[in-house]
């Protein structure tokens, strides 16, 4: 029960890494609220989590690209849980485009969800954390925030920015009881990643696996385990840090 009597808000909580993190946090005693823009998935997964955990789960529909909706949602979660001790920013979207063909709407969608969305949630939750001088924030960044893969623009721009946001806020509020860290997953078996893999030939899928030194694709619960550690008091001396979870791929010089 490493998160007993702690409360957590998880964005993008109805699928992928966010959902895996919610399951892990519930198993460790946390009170959990999920924020997601997919109302059907949110309703379905909240009901499932209640059945499997035997605990109440708060679900709030909101798009992290909408400041008003985020402020309302964070206030609702704070009221339902009593406070917010932990924020996990897992909401994100893959946006890949040719740089010279990237229009304003595509650029804004990428930055608004993948970078500014995390900031909106933090900005809404931070005053309460500062008042209590206690809070853990974990942003789900990406290996794209460390290494550039051709054809992935402008997604790496947002993820580099998210790691910068993590470091900046972690230092800014370190002396006031707040820790801000990030996790950079590589190829993790989330629904979007699985859909992409399913669209590849068998040889291409095997090539993606072979690029990983461990010769396997990562699982969402492996990212959730790291989020659990960073959100717990066990990691109380870890701040303004990013942890790569990519099976070692980003350390290899590929031909």
Image (spheres, rainbow, N blue to C red):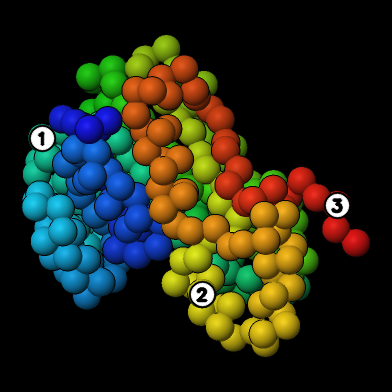
Would residue 217 appear left or right of 24 to someone viewing this image?
A: right
The one nearer the camera, 28 or 132, is 28
Q: How far apart are marks 1 and 3 (CA)?
A: 49 Å
Q: Earlier in the sequence, mark 3 or mark 2?
A: 2
Q: Residue 130: percent from the left, percent from the top?
A: 29, 22
Q: Mark 1 points at which residue?
A: 82
Q: Say which residue appears at 35% left-offset and 65% top-offset.
A: 15
Q: Residue furthest top?
A: 175
Q: Which of marks 1 and 2 is nearer the N terminus?
A: 1
Q: How far apart are marks 3 and 2 (CA)?
A: 25 Å
Q: Name the residue under label 3.
A: 253
Q: Say which residue appears at 50% left-offset and 24% top-offset.
A: 239
Q: Say which residue appears at 50% left-offset and 65% top-offset.
A: 189
Q: What numbered label is drawn on residue 63? A: none
Q: Name the residue under label 2.
A: 194
Which-is-in-front pick, marks 1 and 2?
2
- Quarter of the figure with residue 39: bottom left
The one nearer the camera, 253 or 90, is 253
């Amino acid at each position: 029960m490493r998160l007993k009597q702690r409360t957590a808000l998880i964005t993008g909580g109805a699928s992928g890494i966010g959902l895996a993190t919610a399951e892990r946090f519930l198993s460790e005693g946390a009170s959990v609220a999920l924020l997601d823009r997919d109302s059907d998935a949110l309703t379905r997964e909240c009901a499932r989590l209640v059945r499997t955990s035997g605990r109440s789960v708060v679900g709030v529909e909101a798009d992290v690209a909408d400041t008003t909706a985020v402020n309302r949602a964070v206030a609702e979660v704070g009221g339902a849980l009593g406070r917010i001790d932990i924020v996990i920013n897992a909401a994100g979207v893959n946006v890949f485009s040719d740089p010279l063909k990237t229009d304003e709407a595509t650029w804004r969608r990428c930055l608004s969800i993948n970078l500014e969305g995390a900031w909106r949630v933090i900005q809404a939750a931070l005053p309460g954390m500062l008042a209590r001088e206690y809070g853990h924030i974990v942003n789900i960044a990406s290996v794209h925030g460390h290494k550039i893969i051709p054809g992935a623009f402008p997604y790496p721009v947002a993820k580099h920015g998210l790691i910068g946001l993590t470091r900046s806020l972690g230092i800014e509020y370190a002396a006031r009881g707040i820790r801000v860290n990030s996790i950079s997953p590589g190829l993790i078996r989330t629904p979007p990643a699985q859909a992409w893999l399913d669209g590849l030939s068998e040889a291409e899928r095997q090539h993606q696996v072979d690029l990983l030194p461990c010769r396997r694709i990562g699982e969402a619960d492996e990212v959730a385990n790291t989020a659990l550690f960073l959100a717990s008091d066990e990691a109380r001396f870890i701040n303004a840090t990013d942890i790569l979870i990519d099976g070692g791929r980003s350390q290899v010089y590929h031909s």
